[in-house]
Amino acid sequence: MKDMNSTIASNISEIAKLARKFNCFYLAGLHQGTCKPFLVGGHQVGLIRPDILKHLERFPEVFRVTGKYVELNPAFRDYKERSSRIAAVLQSLKKEGEICALKGWRDECFEVSTPFYHESLMEMDRSAICLFGIRNYGVSINGYLFHPIKGLCIWLQQRSFTKQTWPGKWDCFVSGGLAVGYGIMETAIKEVAEEASVIGDLAKKLVPAGCVSFYFESERGLFPNTEYVYDLELPQDFKPENADGEVETFELLTAEECVQRALTTQFKTTSAPVLLDFLIRRGFINPENEPNYRHIIELLHVPLQTIYKWPQTDIVTNGDGENLQH
């Protein structure tokens, strides 16, 4: 245990940096005030950056742009109409080929709902969710075992090089987005079967372990993510096999090796919260070996619901006439 602690201690600053990296928008971009709240049906469901706003302004019949917010035309009153109107705009922008996120079009829709209670407002192709800063929900599964000599070991996957996002990067054992029409546990069972061939009685051993939430930003857009987490203890002789072509390979690593892998550029940044949360819950990262323990835990549970609270969100204007969100 002493050797493990010394290894973790040498990476304290790096682990804290990683936690800040997957929350780069929450810690920096959010407070710059350059994004406008996005409203649908009177509810704030997202934030829109200036680089995306310039494209949406070309569709005044769909988006109402004011000095303080962007609103989907309130004349669109139901789920179906809102969804079809948005889809038409996105298809037009996709054909133009100027927005990088839309080049990864998925033909799979995510739901857009109210922030505090579940009311479905519309749906949107998952590739476009980040353009509007809409909350994104997914499921992640930690596949692990206790080796008689190596101790806690964790299965990681390398994503296929043909994936639309993060191709070839190392990732958690299994993960997938929460698509329209699928429940949380239903998604978990579907994904472990497709990605790792976990079926039958073994799949029934999935244990819900809460969730992590964070707010990431990349050149593609804004990612206010919530991942529902499941733990799955696997037999020592189990060998995961991919069944849907989305995984390049799997590798079983010790907990220490997983930390080292997560700190490299070869690991998918937005999957790091799930791995860190698991290592914290298993005691591998703890208050004794990580001085930034409390800070890291807070960054694994960012209160996204308090960010999207228009019209309570305070908007002030600086001397240059720019809107600042606090």
Image: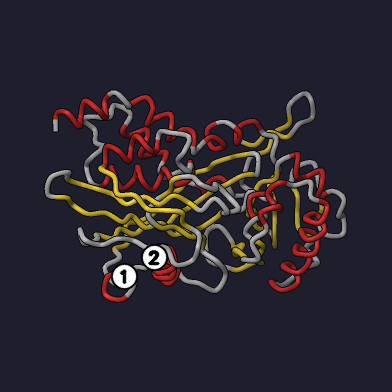
Q: Residue at horizontal 48%, vertical 51%?
A: 159
Q: Are marks 1 and 2 in contact (CB under 8 Å)?
A: yes
Q: Nearer the viewer, residue 115 or 84?
A: 84
Q: Residue 160 placed where, x, y %?
A: 51, 53
Q: Residue at horizontal 43%, vertical 48%?
A: 171
Q: Nearer the viewer, residue 28 or 220?
A: 220
Which disc number belongs to residue 218? none
Q: Is residue 170 above or below residue 120?
A: above
Q: How many marks?
A: 2
| Mark closer to the chain start, 1 or 2 | 2
Instruction: Classify residue 306 as left or right of residue 273.
Output: right
Q: Residue 80 placed where, x, y %?
A: 71, 74
Q: Is residue 113 above or below residue 47?
A: below
Please tell me whether mark 2 sits on a helix, a strand or a loop. helix
Q: Residue 303 placed where, x, y %?
A: 47, 46
Q: Residue at horizontal 31%, vertical 70%?
A: 203
Q: Is residue 27 above or below residue 191?
A: above
Q: Nearer the viewer, residue 299 or 306?
A: 299
**Residue at the extreme bottom of the image, as rendered:** 200
Give the spatial CA distance, label 1 vs label 2: 7 Å
Query: In the rendered structure, which amino acid carries the disc numbered 2?
Result: Val
Q: Quadrant for the C terminus, please.
A: top right
Question: Crowding near pointer 1: few (<14 within 10 Å), some, many (20+)?
Answer: some
Question: Crowding near pointer 2: few (<14 within 10 Å), some, many (20+)?
Answer: many
Instruction: Classify residue 233 as left or right of residue 82.
Output: left
Which disc number belongs to residue 203? 1
Q: How is the image coloured?
A: secondary structure
Which disc number belongs to residue 192? 2
**Residue at the extreme left of the image, as rendered:** 148
